[in-house]
Amino acid sequence: MNTIKHYRNIVVSFALVTWVISMVVLLNSCKKKDDPKPPENEEELITTVKLKVKNTLFSSDSTEVVWKDLDGNGGNPPSIGTLTLRANSFYSAQLALLDESHAGHTHNINDEINNEKAEHQFFYQATGNLSNFAYVDFDANGKPVGLRFSFQTGAAGSATLKITLRHKPNKSAPGVSSGDITNAGGSTDIEVTFPVTIQP
């Protein structure tokens, strides 16, 4: 009789352990389904960068150049316009970033940058006689964004202007607020280089 009771206790204990294990597995399974990991914020596709510049003293001296790469990295090379400027002049500038990868639909990336100003900053690196780059637009903390900026030309000649957009840079790092990309960190959303001709 004791033997039967002993076996019965073993069977009950085994059934109880099996039930507990099943419940743990079930709860874990439900948790994975009910609490999915939130998707990461994907970077926007930028196919087109437009740069508009205007001479601050001569309104007739204004132009727009375009960098365009509709098929993205690894496909056909981008088309790049040449920026023509007047020597020894001051210019105001404005950037427009677009996603034109879908025919018939243009997505304005500027809207998202303006909505997340604290997470974006443009940097300008030039060769030749381009200098005195200054930010015109800022985030809520008074840190630069750079969709709008100003700069100066020197003597006539050839130059280049590289424009880099960083996502989540450290704007408080040394030199970053003044436009030095060295300590910026973050990730690069887009980087384009325009050839520049400075005319007499």
Image (cartoon, rainbow, N blue to C red):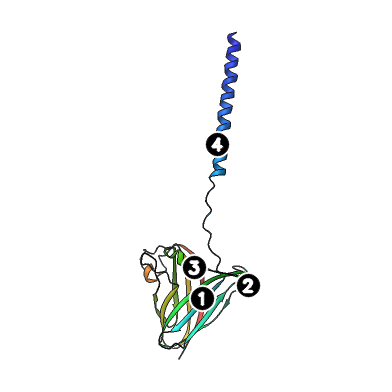
Task: Give the residue type at disc 3.
Answer: Asp
Among the 4 quarters of the image, the one containing residue 146: bottom left
CA gap between label 1 and label 2 equals: 16 Å
Image spot of residue 160 (x, y percent): 48, 79
Q: What residue type is labelled 2?
A: Asn
- Determine the CA span between mark 1 and mark 4: 54 Å
Q: Earlier in the sequence, mark 1 or mark 2?
A: 2
Does label 1 or label 4 sit earlier along the sequence?
Answer: 4
Q: Residue 193 carries which label?
A: 1
- Residue at figure coordinates x 55%, y 29% from the top left: 20
Residue under circle 3? 111
Q: Nearer the viewer, mark 3 or mark 2?
A: 3
In this rendering, position of residue 142 left or right of residue 194 = left
Asked if the residues shown at circle 1 and circle 4 are in contact, with their CB atoms under 8 angstroms apart, the answer is no
Figure label count? 4
Question: Which circle, 4 or 2, is nearer the viewer?
Answer: 4
Q: Is residue 25 above or below residue 188?
A: above
